[in-house]
Amino acid sequence: MGMIESRLAGMGLTLPKMHPYPSPNRTGCVRSGNLLFLSGHGTGRQEMPLNIKQYGKVGTEVSEEEAYLCAKSVALAMMATIKAEVGDLDRVRRVIRLYGMVNSAPGFERQFAVIDGASDLFYELWGPEFGRHARAAVGIAELPRRAVLEIMGEFELQPDA
């Protein structure tokens, strides 16, 4: 077990099974050189960690606190995809950028606080130098299958030895 997974274990967290993509025309991530681009990962799957609500609009059906846990859970799912692609989370040099979309009820304006669930976890795992990242957090009217949120990410990998 690598350093990042040891830190996760110390927090009482584990990675879920990687989400299989339902179509051959897309995948969970694409690697280009030392960059890894993750497709949108969201709630609405059968196996999500942290026993979270997976469906509904934040601000009416889902509280901000519940949505924060959704974002943290989605970050774990993103890490499961990374591990499946590169074999070890310690291969990630830095978190570059997250783009979070929150299924928001009219008037809900705290998308930034929701996506902090993912940002805080990445920051805690990779530290201030490599875990701090650029980010967008936007509210949208609908997400597929009524998912609470969806997050895309970009990561830099350690150079190949």
Image (cartoon, grey):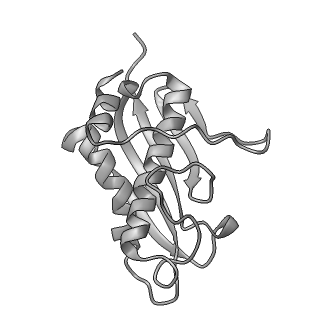
Q: Residue furthest left?
A: 128
Q: Which residue lies furthest to the bottom in this view?
A: 107
Q: Which residue is drawn at 22% across and 40% down?
A: 127
Where residue 85 sits in the image (x, y, percent)?
55, 27
Quarter of the image for the C terminus: give it.
top left
**As drawn, 87 above or below 37:** above
Indicate the quadrant where residue 128 lies: top left
Where residue 114 sits in the image (x, y, percent)?
39, 67
Quarter of the image for the N terminus: give it.
top left
Where residue 69 sits in the image (x, y, percent)?
40, 61
**As drawn, 91 above or below 150:** above
**As drawn, 11 above or below 41:** above
**As drawn, 61 above or below 124:** below
Q: Residue at x 46, y 27 (%)?
A: 34
Query: Residue 123 or 49: which is nearer the viewer?
Result: 49
> Does residue 105 appear in the picture of this structure?
yes
Q: How many labels does the image show?
A: 0
> Does residue 130 appear in the picture of this structure?
no
Q: Which residue is drawn at 47% across and 49% down?
A: 49
